[in-house]
Amino acid sequence: MNRFRPSHIRTRLTLWYVSLLAGLLLLYGAGTLALLLRNLNKELAAHTVEDLETLEGLLYFDSQGQLKLREDYHNHPESKHVQERLLEVRSPDGALLYRNDRLGSRALGGAPFRGEGEGTYSQRSVRLSDGTRVQLASRRHVIDGRPVLIRLAYSQVLVWRALDEMLIAQSAGLILALGLAGLGGYALARRALAPLDEMAGQAERITSENLHERLPTESVDDELGHMARVFNCTLTRLEQSFEQLRRFTSDASHELRTPLTLIRSVGEVGLQKGRTAEEYREIVGSMLEEVNRLTRLLDSLLTISRADAGQISLRPALIRMPDLARECAGLFEALAEEKGVCLSVEAASSANIQGDPILLRQAVVNILHNALKYSSSGGVVVLRSVDLASGCAIEVEDDGPGIPEEHRERIFDRFYRLDEGRSRGAGGAGLGLSIAKWTVQAHGGRIDLRPAPGGGCIFRITLPAAGCAPNRALRTDLEPVLSGRGRV
């Protein structure tokens, strides 16, 4: 079916335009011809009646009883030859009384039908024996005391000839109009779609290496301009996604290379000379430590990858904020005691939230782990839950070195660290806070960072109370959250 379909839009637009115009012109022409035919027949019928009224006074019976027509009323001797009337007079019983020379042997009808010409003129269009179409009028009349039926007709040849001439003129005009419309329509379509050709040419030149280029939109303010702007917005998002992918790949490669290099170095050093069983045990222990670090990194990368793909489904349940705070603090009692850090819990909140217990606990654990990791011996870390007007919050406050102001907005970026060497040595990969931010925002909340009054940091997770969470609280569209450059 599409074999004969034009490939270019401008050609299809031109054909559609010309076809529509042809249809409209044909309808207009048909209406005009129908109106012309009606008016001409109407005028011919009126002329027939007028002539019939005139003839009623010109017919007479001579002394022999023959019906005659006076012809001495013409103003010009030749005018009687101009008359194209077809005249026939019959008696009420159908006997022929008179037939003019122009009618000849043809008849305008047989015996009068019932009611023909009684009281008014009977008008109709009939076809003669030779096929001639005529406009016929008949009326009963009394001539010299004798009733007769007068039939007068005029040929419709001139009407149809005028109609044919009008049809020929309209056809020629239609062909000319459609030709001009086609040329003009094609030129207009080509001019209107010229920006689209320019956009297509520019789009063909855009690849993954030059995603910074955009489609031209300076001189286009119509639908094409809107399409170009939408496409440019798509290119912007693609450029950001490619940049995010490059940065993520680079950071992930760097993070993976470090433990692998350490494992290889430890293994090579261990094989350079013979060692005791205790020394080999230490070497294997060092390698296992790096393997554990590598495993944690891969788990975090897997979590982020699944989040980016929207494959993490939240399983909401009713959670009591004090219970969540105490449970997270209980996981780090041993670590806090080992580091000599005082870990306290202030569960002042009584609110309940609706969320995924596992993911929310992991978010709080990531923040609490960072607080303990960077707190020095003798420090204090406080985990508190508080009620808010629109929900509730969990705060983690430490008295560590704090985070400089210029780093606070990027602290939730993937692989971002304040101190590369110290963070890696402590086992971090710069992904915990990014995962925590996604978890909180996926539950319709937010995460804030501000400096503590006595030094250190305060991380606050704000969540809506149960029954107050918006519909988007449990969404799984995670791209805006894990964009890699997200900010609170």
Image (cartoon, rainbow, N blue to C red):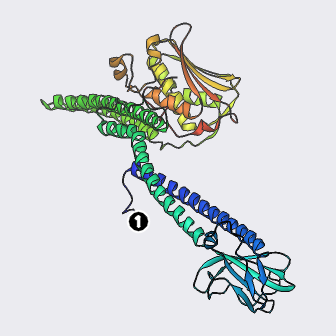
In the image, what residue occupies the spot 58% across and 83% down?
Answer: 131
- For this orientation, the residue located farthest to the top is 454
Dividing the picture into quadrants, the one containing residue 112 is: bottom right
Question: Visible in this render: residue 295?
Answer: yes
Residue at position x 37%, y 31% from top? 214
Q: Is residue 25 above or below residue 245?
A: below
In the image, taking residue 250 as reference, residue 471 lies left or right, namely right
Q: Look at the numbered disc 1 and give the secondary structure of its residue.
A: loop
Where does residue 469 sit, x and y in percent of width and height?
66, 34
Q: Can you give x and y, in whole percent of width and height, for residue 83 in the image? A: 64, 72
- Residue 220 rendering spot, x and y as whole percentages: 45, 32
Image height of 118 relative to 265, above or below: below
**Going by the image, does 107 lie left or right of 414?**
right
**How many callouts does the rendering have?**
1
Q: Is residue 29 above or below residue 103?
A: above
Q: Is residue 189 above or below residue 236?
A: below
Q: Is residue 423 left or right of residue 60?
A: left
40, 57: nearer the viewer: 57
Q: Residue at x 55, y 30 (%)?
A: 440
**Residue 393: image x %, image y %?**
63, 24
**Residue position marked by numbered label 1 in the rendering:** 1
Q: Which residue ends up furthest to the left in the rendered image?
A: 273
Q: Amino acid at mark 1?
A: Met
